[in-house]
Amino acid sequence: MSTIRYLKNLIKDRNVASITPSSSFTVKKATRPINFDNDNIIVEFGPGTGVFSEYLLKKLSPNSRLIMIELNADFAKLLSQIQDERVSVYEESALAIDEILENEGVDQADYILSGIPFSFLNNDIKHQILNKSADYLKNDGKFLAYQTSSHLKKSLEKYFSSVSISYEWRNLPPMCIYEANK
Ligand SMILES: C[S@@+](CC[C@H](N)C(=O)[O-])C[C@H]1O[C@@H](n2cnc3c(N)ncnc32)[C@H](O)[C@@H]1O
């Protein structure tokens, strides 16, 4: 069901970018650095049909929060149907993270999980999003991203103290998974 919705939006909206939702292997690998024993504030950029969100909500503690920022109106509408007090959904660009966190009464997040296609963004917007992401993460916070190539590493290194990469081949297309530490 959600794959059909995903494909319909891919045809209409180039920002959807990837040809299928992320696989369960990608979801598990990209979220491995998250410490689920703690109460976490997680900001998700580009949740799409919610494959990561669904997994996170099963693992997150009752006092954790998941703030989703999704540019595509149809996906944002779908995600708004999630009945869970820990969730907030914004139909917005990741660029609005500052206004959104202010609205949520949150100073800084523990993790930012990002699926937005940075290679499709203009360079200035890309750097503004990465710069704000680093600002709005706690000192021990992590920026976790997945992209179809390793192009983002150099840009991340400008804003984060360390960046590592791994790959998940059981995804269509294969995914490059980033872990960036503030
Ligand atoms: C490659 S898809 C990933 C979808 C989902 N997270 C997954 O793994 O299946 C990229 C998503 O990012 C969204 N997106 C693209 N640019 C965005 C932006 N600037 N801010 C927020 N979301 C954005 C798209 O609408 C799409 O849902």
Image (cartoon, rainbow, N blue to C red):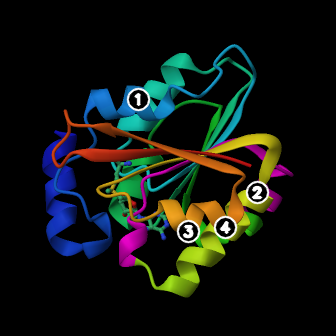
- 120 shown above or below 152: below
Mark 4 sits on what residue?
158
* Cβ of mark 2 under 8 A from ligand 1: no
Tell me which amino acid carries mark 4: Lys
In-image side of 52 versus 20 (left or right): right
Q: Residue at x 37, y 58 (%)?
A: 150
Quadrant containing the N terminus in the rendered view: top left
Is residue 29 found left or right of 40 in the rendered image? left
Mark 3 in CB contact with mark 4 (< 8 angstroms): yes
> Do residues under tags 2 and 4 come within 8 Å of each other at their CB atoms?
no
Under tag 2, what secondary structure? helix
Q: Which residues are magenta?
A: 100-120
Amino acid type of the residue tagged 1 in the rendering: Lys
Residue at the spot 46% in from the left edge and 85% down from the top edge: 122
Q: Earlier in the sequence, mark 2 or mark 4?
A: 2
Q: Nearer the viewer, mark 1 or mark 2?
A: 1
C-alpha separation, residue under disc 1 versus residue under disc 2: 26 Å
Q: Residues within 10 Å of mark 3 (few under 14, many from 20)?
A: some
Circle 1 residues within 10 Å: few <14, some 14–19, many ≥20 = some
Q: Is mark 3 within 8 Å of ligand 1?
A: no
The residue carrying pointer 4 sits among few (fewer than 14), some (14 to 19) or many (20 or more) residues within 10 Å by Cα, namely some
Instruction: Identify the mark nearer the N-term, 2 or 3.
Output: 2
Disc 3 versus disc 4: distance between alpha carbons?
Answer: 6 Å
Find disc 2 in the rendering and name its residue: 101
Badges 1 and 3: C-beta atoms under 8 Å apart? no
In this picture, residue 94 sits left or right of residue 71: right
Query: Which of disc 3 and disc 1 is earlier in sequence?
Result: 1
Residue 155 disc label: 3
The numbered disc on residue 29 is: 1
Q: Is residue 116 magenta?
A: yes
Residue 23: image location, x then y, percent: 25, 34
